[in-house]
Image (cartoon, rainbow, N blue to C red):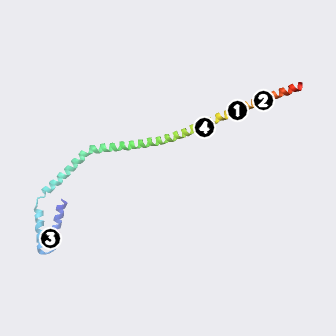
C-alpha cells in the first residue's frame, strides 16, 4: 500500500514538473493507477493482518512456557550460586579444621615429649635422692664406726 501511494505521489509530482511530454505521460500513468482496482492490495493487507494475529495467538502458549522456563532457569542459577558459595565456605572450614587438627597433633606430640622429659628428670631425681640417701647411710655408718 505504501508502494502504491508512493507511485501515486511520484506521478502527481512528475505531472506538475518537466516538459509537456513528461507531464502528459505522468498524468496518463496517474490516471491508470487511480483507475486500477485496489482490491487485491486491500485483500493482501487484510490477509497479512489476519496471519499476524493468528501467529500471535499461536505464539501465546509458547511465550508463557518460555517465561516459566526462564523463571525456573533464574531460580536454578541462584540455587547453583548459593550451593557454590556454600561449598567454598565448607572447603575453607575444612582447611581450617585440618590446620587445627595438625596443630593439635603437634601439641600432643610436644606434650608427649615433655612428659617423657619430665619422667626422665623424675627418674634422675629419684636416682640422685637414692644416691644421696646411700651416701648419708655410709656417712652415718662411718661416723658410728
Residue 31 x/y as whole percent: 11, 65
Q: CA distance from mark 3 to mark 1?
A: 126 Å
Q: CA distance from mark 2 to mark 4?
A: 34 Å
Q: Which residue is mark 4?
A: 106
Q: Secondary structure at mark 3?
A: helix
Q: Residue at x 77, y 31 (%)?
A: 128
Q: Which residue is mark 2?
A: 129
Q: Residue at x 70, y 32 (%)?
A: 120
Position of the C terminus by quadrant: top right
- In this view, the mark in front (4 or 1): 1
Q: Which residue is mark 1?
A: 120
Residue count near mark 4 (Cα–Cα under 10 Å), binned few <14, some 14–19, many ≥20: few
Which residues are drawn in magenta? Answer: 12-16
Residue 62 x/y as whole percent: 27, 44
Marks counted in the figure total 4
Mark nearer the N terminus (2 vs 1)? 1
Q: Is residue 131 left or right of residue 70?
A: right
The residue nearer to you, when weighing 63 against 93, is: 93
Q: Which residue is mark 3?
A: 15
The residue nearer to you, when weighing 47 against 129, is: 129
The residue nearer to you, when weighing 130 against 71, is: 130
- In this view, the mark in front (2 or 3): 2
Q: CA distance from mark 2 to mark 3?
A: 139 Å
Q: Is residue 13 rendered magenta in the image?
A: yes
Mark nearer the N terminus (3 vs 4)? 3
- In this view, the mark in front (2 or 4): 2
Relative vertical location of residue 116 with respect to residue 38 in this rendering, above or below? above
Q: Residue at x 64, y 36 (%)?
A: 110
Quadrant housing residue 5: bottom left
Q: Is residue 80 rendered magenta in the image?
A: no
Q: Secondary structure at mark 2?
A: helix
Q: Residue at x 16, y 70 (%)?
A: 14
Amino acid at each position: 500500500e505504501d508502494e502504491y501511494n508512493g507511485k501515486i505521489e511520484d506521478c502527481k509530482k512528475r505531472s506538475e514538473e518537466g516538459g509537456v511530454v513528461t507531464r502528459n505521460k505522468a498524468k496518463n500513468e496517474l490516471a491508470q493507477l487511480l483507475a486500477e482496482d485496489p482490491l487485491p492490495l486491500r485483500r493482501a493487507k487484510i490477509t497479512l493482518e489476519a496471519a499476524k494475529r493468528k501467529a500471535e495467538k499461536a505464539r501465546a502458549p509458547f511465550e508463557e512456557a518460555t517465561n516459566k522456563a526462564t523463571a525456573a532457569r533464574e531460580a536454578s542459577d541462584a540455587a547453583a550460586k548459593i550451593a557454590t558459595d556454600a561449598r567454598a565456605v565448607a572447603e575453607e572450614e575444612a582447611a581450617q579444621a585440618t590446620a587445627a587438627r595438625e596443630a593439635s597433633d603437634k601439641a600432643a606430640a610436644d606434650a608427649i615429649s615433655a612428659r617423657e622429659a619430665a619422667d626422665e628428670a623424675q627418674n634422675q631425681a629419684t636416682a640422685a635422692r637414692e644416691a644421696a640417701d646411700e651416701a648419708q647411710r655410709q656417712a652415718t655408718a662411718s661416723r658410728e664406726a
